[in-house]
Image (cartoon, grey):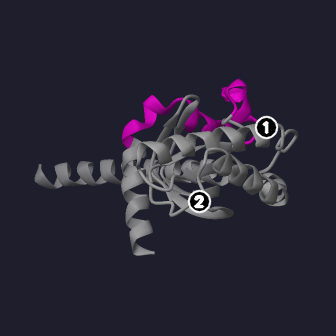
Amino acid sequence: MKRWLKAVCGAVMICMVLSLCGFAGDCAVVRDSVVRLHILANSDSDEDQALKLRVRDAVTAAGAGLLDGVTTREEAETRLQTALPQLIETAQQCVYEAGFSYPVTAELTTMYFGTRAYDSGTFPAGRYHAVRFSIGEARGKNWWCVMYPPLCVSASTDKAALSDVMSEDACKIVCDAPRYVVRFKVVEWFETIVEWLT
């Protein structure tokens, strides 16, 4: 009886691991399909946090329409790279107009994000392509959204915007997140260990 119980437990564990591997693969598709916008405040002071939000508003307004008609992450990154000097100038001007002298820098990069919820869905933990803006010393709390597909713009925060750039399974993971909360946590633990090791 003991041997039979061990065999059943082993089979269940193998099924769980295989199921998680498939889910992790779908999560990788999600991560590879989007470009995130990440803005780091100078500090956690009320003034610097308010400034971060002003920069957010200026950058998202300047970027509205920038990615219209884009169908791949690579194409989005090409357009963003071209527009980056103008977006930096917009952010820097916003900082000056608010009465601060902090420098603003920005870059296209790949960086780690934990599992994050957004109005239109939940994105699994892992390394994402991102446009990262740093205000001053960039030691404050950050703000983020999904720049491609354009989920920073409230009019576009629907499932259709995601389904245009992701597989059906990957889109379900983002849009139907409550079904995947436990799996997200397991993937996040795994991704955190991988991130720590690398």
Q: Please, what is the three-letter code of the amino acid marked with disc 2?
A: Tyr
For the point 67% across and 35% down, the residue is 151
Tell me, for residue 19, which label it has, or none. none
Closer to the chain start, of discs 1 and 2, is 1
For the point 61% across and 58% down, the residue is 101
Residue that protrudes farthest toward the front in the picture: 99
Write down the region rendered in magenta.
153-182
Q: Please, what is the three-letter code of the amino acid marked with disc 1?
A: Ala
Q: Nearer the viewer, residue 56 or 175?
A: 56
Disc 1: which residue: 64
Residue that protrudes farthest toward the right in the picture: 69
Disc 2: which residue: 102
Please state if 113 lies on the left or on the right of 154 as rendered. left
Quarter holding residue 70? top right
Image coordinates for residue 142, horizontal then vertical, percent: 49, 49
Q: Quick check: 132 above or below 67?
A: below
Q: How far apart are labels 1 and 2 at the CA level?
A: 25 Å
As helix, strand or loop, the secondary structure at mark 1 comes to loop
Image coordinates for residue 12, horizontal then vertical, percent: 31, 47
Discs 1/2, front: 2
Image coordinates for residue 179, horizontal then vertical, percent: 44, 31
